[in-house]
Amino acid sequence: MPILTEDLVYQSPNGKDLHACLYRPEGPGPFPAVLEVHGGAWTSGDRFNNVTIAEALAADGVVVLSIDFRMPPDAPYPAASQDVNLGIRFLKANATKFGSRPDLVGGLGTSSGGHLLLLSALRPNDARYTTLPLPGSDVDASLAFAIACWPVADPLKRYRTVQANGNDRLVAAHDAFWPSVEDMTDGNPTLILQRGESVAKPPVLIIQGTNDNNLTPDMAGGFAMAYAAAGGKVTFESFPEQPHAFIPNAPAAPASVQALHLIRAFVHRNTI
């Protein structure tokens, strides 16, 4: 399906524009829609990190809004979560204009963006994340579905792991993004579920490779188990021998083609 792309500004906190790239299938719709959140250890990357995923979804009849968000050193947690929350509300408020509907809006995040997306999916109305205004709209940030690819689903566990392994780059990223270990514990999707917090529970798809040297082998599966135990509907797809970020790094590889097929099918299945 032919697609149209457009770069736009979705918010301007403190006078600094934050951009998003909109991918729209040609046609009247209404199409499902996805708010896409990039990875980069919360400290790097931009809305173009996952162009491969965004274009594949748009070509299959899904509207995608890939957002930039604030990052350290100027904006530690929870600034990025506030931006993701507003990004979802912005997409829902403009869904009809973009060829979708508010009730068809879900989200997708990769790596640290997977963490941000899962956190927002669980806490769409948390007062710490809803602080940015969206004039003229009263939509909330609840999602029809959530997709997390190789997510940092337990940032505290990952922090302890990279400290033990001497991964100075990721230790520094955690230290830059999280003001404290207490924040890392609080804003932790897996621990939120294990603590029994009252959360939103949209259908979730997890994509994870087994050869991921960026995460502990059980991290994504641990979140999936906790989500199911909390009563959530979750699909966990494991990809043998695949590394971190295998879809954007090798989009034509058989595993990536299969993963993209599963993602597209999941979106359409949950927006019927």
Image (cartoon, rainbow, N blue to C red):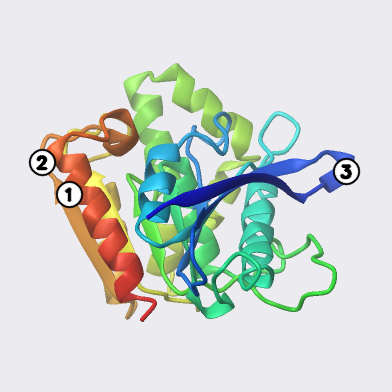
> Is the residue 148 above or below the residue 271 in the image?
above
The reply to whether callout 3 and callout 1 are in contact (CB within 8 Å) is no
User: Going from the N terminus, do you reach mark 1 or mark 2 first?
Assistant: 2
C-alpha separation, residue under disc 2 versus residue under disc 3: 45 Å
Viewer-side residue, 78 vs 13? 13
Amino acid bearing label 1: Gln
Q: Which residue is mark 1?
A: 258
Question: Front-most of 189 and 196?
Answer: 189
Say if residue 180 shows up in the picture: yes
* Position of residue 154 measured from the top left corner of the image (x, y, whole percent): 40, 49
The amino acid pointed to by label 2 is Pro
Question: Picture coordinates of residue 173 (x, y %)?
Answer: 54, 28
How far, Cα to Cα, is label 3 from label 1?
42 Å
In the picture of the structure, the residue carrying the numbered disc 2 is: 240
Give the foreground label among 3 and 1.
Answer: 1
Left/right placement of residue 84 relative to residue 50 reads right
Question: Where does the N terminus fall, quadrant-wise?
Answer: bottom left
Residue visible at 66% across and 67% down?
Answer: 89
Between marks 1 and 2, how big is the CA–CA gap? 12 Å
Residue 272, image x and y in percent?
Answer: 36, 81
Camera-side mark, 1 or 2: 1
Q: Which SS class for mark 3?
A: helix
Q: Secondary structure at mark 1?
A: helix
Q: Position of residue 119 (x, y in %)?
A: 51, 59
In the image, is residue 33 above or below residue 24? Answer: below
Query: Taking 203 as reference, is 133 left or right?
Result: right
Residue pointed to by mark 3: 14
Q: Residues within 10 Å of mark 2 (few under 14, many from 20)?
A: few
Nearest the eye: 193 or 109: 109
Left or right side of 128 for 258:
left
Label 3 is placed on what type of residue? Asn
Q: Is residue 7 left or right of residue 168?
A: right
